[in-house]
């Protein structure tokens, strides 16, 4: 696969506030890459930099081998689907989609063909003469996508394009977008702060926080091997506990020594240990590697989400077994359920469910505060 | 008794009373006067007079010519008003655009500067222009001191147009500016993203979107400048009577019925023109049918 866009050591600040801090990122041809991170972490800014609406203070934007820092947006072979669609209200659906073609002076007949083709791709064939202001959010969204795709850019930038849609529509559009990306072969750079959306759609996920890239990888990499506590917490649910790496493949935490699959840490190096809630096996109290007291049980449909107090640290565990509040249970961890991360500045900030369980306590038992 | 009046309708009540008393009733009076003679019996004579009355005017080369007095004046009013409106648009549109792009403080300052003349009585403004444009006025003194020949402006159509442009300019700038100021900048970005350079963005997005402002600017300048009076008397030395002057003259001379008839004709024509403009823009700009 060829690199189509490279961001090299990009920094950007607004009014003295650093928004992007030395970001480097390679984007490959034909991939669906997602920038994922909490609000304000610099996703939109990164996207706008690729689109040409923001210039980096430092670093280079490379497009197919050429530095394009100073190339204005209209000369970049990159189109954007904006956060709120930005359709032209004075033009109907057809003319909105035809907009970039008219600018290029494409012959009328060809414009008609291409627009019709695009409208059918986004399933809006009968809508050519409708005013865009009369469309629903989901339909406007499709028009925006058709408009951005009609001139076959090399790269499509999508800034939280599904943010304004309701859950059902959102799921449908996710599938459709993925299909469109596959069928057109256009590189999609997608921005979202919804981790589920990122996991289900992307070839590559770029996790960002505070203007820095925390991790780049495939959805499974990111989920199974988070680089630090921030990523582990942001992607899915995680129990993150302090541990010590005794030796390769041996880690100690929760007053117990476990076998694990990680190596290459220093002897007795303090580490963060991640255990996903669905990877913990529940066994009878005396059969477990360690034990804990169930403090809450929430039925989630397919599984129960239980909070277990293990020596004062609250774990979240997802299980299909039925357990009761107050019950003492045994817990077992397979080596592949344990993931070891180096300590980072995010250590200790995430992965403890005490506040979570407190909330539940308060909800179920409004009278009785503990602290 | 109707106790079902909700608060909304109660709030509307004073305005309804107001518009009946001060808009509908006077309009009815205008209509009534226009179609009656001094003894208040029905007649169309004022309309006939408006369209057929003639007078003799002297041409520059000494010959004389029969003209339809009021039709001529009316057409002149329309012509001067159109020219003034066009100049206002030509000057006002770029200004509104630049203003909307400026920093907020600059915007407020420019706005104030544009509004200040409106705070002065328009008689005073007109007199000020007389002083400037007179044969021995400020403009000519400056020209002379710079070594140019004196020019004759006062008493020309140019002077009348200058006066009208100056008076009505803010009414052109403000509606266009207010549309441009709240225009969604993302639309501009979208256009650039889709391949438009600055000029194309202006032509394909900003201009069409600002059209409602342009239309209301044109309406707000054209209509009062067609029916304006006094400016023409003072700056045109009375040589270019406008329809507003005629109405005023007839009114002062106590020919209320004829004055009402002219006002009525003016109103009908303006309403028709506005309807055409409105229909036209909606149909061709916002209807947006494609081939
Ligand atoms: N033009 C600008 N001027 C000043 N500050 C800006 C500008 N654009 C972005 N910022 C700031 O940069 C930071 C990152 O913004 P950005 O829009 O990239 O975040 P984001 O990750 O897209 O967030 P969200 O998920 O809320 O859209 C924010 O603190 C924002 O206030
Ligand atoms: Mg954003």
Image (cartoon, helix red, strand yellow):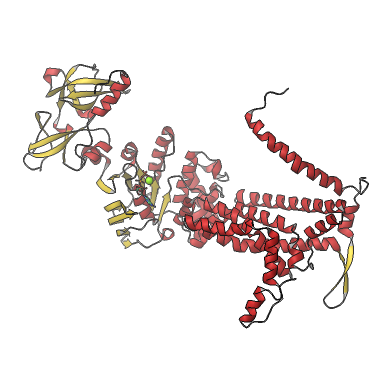
Q: Residue at x 69, y 77 (%)?
A: B151
User: Residue A314's quadrant in the figure?
Assistant: top left
Work out whether residue B154 can be spotted. yes
Work out whether residue A105 can be spotted. no
* Position of B247 relative to A31 (above/below): below
At which x and y percent is residue A65?
30, 61
At which x and y percent is residue A114?
50, 51
At which x and y percent is residue A170?
41, 36
* Position of B248 relative to A166 (above/below): below
Question: Is residue A34 left or right of B95 when viewed as pictured?
Answer: left
Q: Residue at x 16, y 22 (%)?
A: A292
User: Residue B64's quadrant in the figure?
Assistant: bottom right
Question: Is residue A155 left or right of A328 when viewed as pictured?
Answer: right
Q: Foreground: A190 or A149?
A: A190
Q: Foreground: A186 or B117?
A: B117
Which image quarter is the C terminus of chain A in?
top left
């Amino acid at each position: 696969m060829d690199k189509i866009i490279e961001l090299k050591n990009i920094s950007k600040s607004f009014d003295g506030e650093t928004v992007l801090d030395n970001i480097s990122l390679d984007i490959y041809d034909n991939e669906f890459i997602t920038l994922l991170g909490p609000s304000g972490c610099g996703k939109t800014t990164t996207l706008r930099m690729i689109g040409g609406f923001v210039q980096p203070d430092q670093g280079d934007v490379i497009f197919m081998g050429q530095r394009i820092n100073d190339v204005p947006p209209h000369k970049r072979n990159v189109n954007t689907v904006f956060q709120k669609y930005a359709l032209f209200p004075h033009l109907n659906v057809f003319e909105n989609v035809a907009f970039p073609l008219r600018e290029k002076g494409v012959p009328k007949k060809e414009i008609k063909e291409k627009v019709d083709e695009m409208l059918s791709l986004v399933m809006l064939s009968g809508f050519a003469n409708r005013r865009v202001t009369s469309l629903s959010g989901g339909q406007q969204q499709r028009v925006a996508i058709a408009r951005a795709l009609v001139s076959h850019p090399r790269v499509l930038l999508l800034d939280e394009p599904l943010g304004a849609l309701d859950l059902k529509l959102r799921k449908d559009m996710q599938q459709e977008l993925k299909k469109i990306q596959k069928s057109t072969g256009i590189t999609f750079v997608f921005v979202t702060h919804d981790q589920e959306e990122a996991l289900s759609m992307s070839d590559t996920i770029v996790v960002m926080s505070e203007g820095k890239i925390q991790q780049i990888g495939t959805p499974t990499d990111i989920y199974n091997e988070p680089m630090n506590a921030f990523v582990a917490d942001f992607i899915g649910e995680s129990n993150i506990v302090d541990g010590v790496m005794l030796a390769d493949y041996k880690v100690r935490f929760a007053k117990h020594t476990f076998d694990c699959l990680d190596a290459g840490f220093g002897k007795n190096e303090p580490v963060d240990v991640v255990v996903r809630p669905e990877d913990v096996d529940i066994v009878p109290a005396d059969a477990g590697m360690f034990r804990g007291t169930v403090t809450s049980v929430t039925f989630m449909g397919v599984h129960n989400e239980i909070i277990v107090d293990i020596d004062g640290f609250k774990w979240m565990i997802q299980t299909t077994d039925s357990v009761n509040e107050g019950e003492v249970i045994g817990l077992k961890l397979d080596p592949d359920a344990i993931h070891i991360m180096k300590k980072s500045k995010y250590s200790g900030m995430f992965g403890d469910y005490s506040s979570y369980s407190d909330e539940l306590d308060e909800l179920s038992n409004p009278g009785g505060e503990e602290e | 008794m109707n106790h079902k009046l909700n608060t909304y309708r109660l709030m509307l009540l004073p305005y309804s009373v107001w518009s009946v008393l001060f808009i509908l009733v006077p309009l009815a009076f205008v209509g009534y006067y226009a179609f009656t003679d001094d003894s208040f019996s029905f007649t169309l004579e004022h309309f006939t007079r408006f369209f057929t009355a003639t007078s003799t005017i002297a041409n520059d080369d000494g010959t004389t010519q029969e003209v339809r007095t009021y039709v001529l004046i009316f057409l002149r009013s329309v012509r001067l008003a159109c020219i003034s409106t066009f100049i206002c648009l030509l000057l006002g549109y770029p200004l509104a655009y630049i203003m909307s792009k400026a920093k907020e403080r600059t915007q407020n300052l420019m706005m104030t500067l544009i509004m200040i003349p409106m705070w002065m009585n328009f008689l005073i403004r007109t007199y000020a222009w007389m002083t400037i444009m007179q044969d021995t006025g400020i403009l000519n003194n400056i020209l002379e001191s710079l070594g140019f020949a004196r020019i004759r402006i006062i008493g020309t159509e140019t002077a009348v147009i200058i006066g009208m442009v100056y008076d009505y300019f803010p009414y052109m700038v403000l509606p266009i500016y207010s549309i441009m100021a709240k225009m969604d900048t993302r639309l501009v970005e979208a256009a650039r993203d889709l391949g438009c350079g600055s000029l194309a963005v202006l032509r394909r997005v900003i201009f069409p979107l600002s059209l409602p402002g342009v239309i209301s600017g044109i309406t707000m300048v054209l209509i009062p400048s067609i029916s304006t009076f006094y400016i023409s008397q003072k700056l045109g030395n009375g040589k270019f009577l406008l329809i507003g002057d005629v109405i005023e003259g007839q009114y002062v001379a106590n020919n209320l019925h004829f004055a009402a008839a002219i006002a009525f004709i003016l109103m009908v024509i303006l309403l028709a023109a506005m309807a055409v403009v409105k229909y036209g823009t909606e149909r061709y700009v916002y209807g947006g049918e494609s081939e």
